[in-house]
Structures are given as C-alpha cells and as structure tokens.
Image: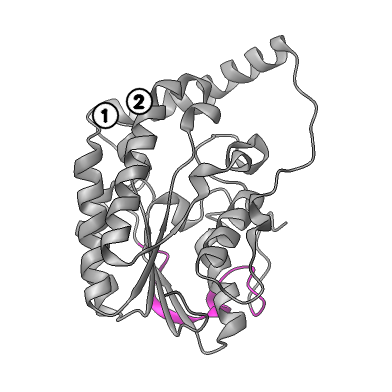
Amino acid sequence: MPHSSYLRYVALGDSQTEGLGDGDDLTGLRGWADRLAERLAAAEPALRYANLAVRGRTAAEVRAGQLAPALALRPDLATVVAGVNDLLRPGFDAAEVAGHMEAMFAELTAAGAHVATLTFPDPGKIIPIARPLRSRALELNARIRAAAARHGVTVAETGGHAVTTDPRLWSADRLHATPLGHERIAAAMADALRLPGSDGTWALPLPPRPVPAGWQAAAAELRWAGTFLGPWLVRRLRGRSSGDGRTAKRPGLLPLGGIPGAPEGRPAAGRP
C-alpha cells in the first residue's frame, strides 16, 4: 500500500526520467522525477533523492546499468520507467521488454523498496506517422500492468487519459514532455502514490485550442521530419544513441536542494 513518507527515492529510466524537455543541459534538467521528489519532500523534508536515468537507454540497458547502483542506495521508493526506446525500434519484443521491467520490479521490491511505474500513451496520437506503433504500446502497457500486479508495484495510468497526448504537453521533438507535461506526469505519480495534496486533476483536459488548417499541419509535419526524424534515423543507422558517453545526472542520494528549480535550488528553465 503506498504511503506518504519516504526518505530515500531513486529514479531509474531513460530521457523522460532524466528530464529532457524540462530545462536544458546548460542550465540543468528538471523533469517529472525531480518534480515528484519536491512533492515527496513536502511530506518528508529529510528526503534524499538520486536520479540514475540516462537518455537513449532501452529497458535492458536500464536494467544492466542502473539496477545494481539503485539497489546499493537502498531506496524505500524507486520509480522504474523504460520501454519507449524499445518500442520505437524495428525488433521490438513486448515480452522481452516487460521481462526486463519485471526483473527490476522483483529485485527492488525484494530489497524493501516500494516501486512505481507508469503506462505509455498511444504514440500515434502524438506523432501521426507512428500510428502503427499503437498495438505495441497497448501490449507493453498490458504486460507492465501484469508484472506490476505480481510484485505490488504502483502504476500511474498516464497512458489511458486523452490529455497525455495533447501536443501542449510535448516538446517540438514529440518524444519528450514539456515542463507542463513533466508536471502532469509528476502529479499522476503523486496521485498513484497517494501523496498528501494529490488528486486526479492531473488528468483533466487543457482548455480548447485553435485547430490548425490542413496546410499548416502538413507544413508542421515536414518541419518535424527534417528537424527531428531525419537525425534520429541517422543515429539509428549508425548504431549511435543520444546517451552515448553520458552518465547519470544525480548518481548519489542528495537533499532536494541539489535540484535545479527546486525550492532551495536555482530556477529551472521553462518552469510553469
């Protein structure tokens, strides 16, 4: 049963957990996990927080590179979010990805941590050319839910609400959340964990927005393909990752003041 007081929070994952789209590499990344840490610290000021996530990592890579360091930190709360980088690749195998997720769930819960994860929205509603990936996302979500149920893992159902595919929650690359998107993810996690002051308002839709004309939408798709899809495909063909040579931004447990934009820290770029 989730509770409201944690002292050692460790986040495992890829670029979304690292915080891409919320700040930048120059001023510092914030992200939903940092924002969740702020909410946890409001309930327990003695909280210490580590973020082991690295952009570009697959579920297997998160397990291989982050699980052992996470266990060494002896968390009482761990979030594990991975699988999107797998989902986008030609050889995607939902059972294999979920197997890596379940292995992390099992080891972390056996070590005494409460574990939380989330489900993924339909990628085709965010990136039109990704519509064929809808079945992949649905299968992966179903397998994550089943694995979570077997290990008492909390699941934030961010994949099942229309607001999570609103373009205002996604950066120009359509792969990473905006500051508002990261805030919604953090609020969803807080709600799932039943933190004080949390509720289901994170799932409410944003105010209506103008619908772009057909030619405007087509032009936006072309710009996106040239600016983001092309370079991404080139990296895949070359066997490279955006995370090559990178390490965790916050490998040790630290007080909250180490987070850019947190109450005791310096302001983060793009804070809503």
Mark 2 near mark 1, Cβ–Cβ under 8 Å? yes
In front: 205, or 256? Answer: 205
Vertical comparison of 157 with 78: above or below: above
Three-letter amino acid code at the position of disc 1: Arg
Q: Which residues are magenta?
A: 248-264
Determine if the magenta segment contains residue 90.
Answer: no
Q: Residue 20 vs residue 52: left or right?
A: right
- Residue 191 in picture, x, y percent from top left: 57, 65
Residue depicted at x 40% and y 21%:
132
Residue depicted at x 49% and y 44%:
159
- Residue 235 in picture, x, y percent from top left: 33, 31
The image's mark for residue 224 is none
Determine if the magenta segment contains residue 252.
Answer: yes
- Residue 210 in picture, x, y percent from top left: 80, 26
Residue depicted at x 25% and y 48%:
98
Residue depicted at x 30% and y 81%:
74
Badge 1 density bin: few <14, some 14–19, many ≥20, Cα 10 Å: few
In front: 212, or 4? Answer: 4
Seen as rendered, the residue at the extreme bottom is 46
- Residue 153 in picture, x, y percent from top left: 35, 64
Badge 2 density bin: few <14, some 14–19, many ≥20, Cα 10 Å: few
Q: Residue 104 vs residue 182: left or right?
A: left
Three-letter amino acid code at the position of disc 2: Val
Residue 27 visible, this angle = no
Q: Secondary structure under badge 1?
A: loop
Vertical comparison of 105 with 50: above or below: above
Task: Give the residue pinned by disc 2.
Answer: 234
> From the image, which quarter does the C terminus lie in?
bottom right
Task: Give the residue pinned by disc 1.
Answer: 238
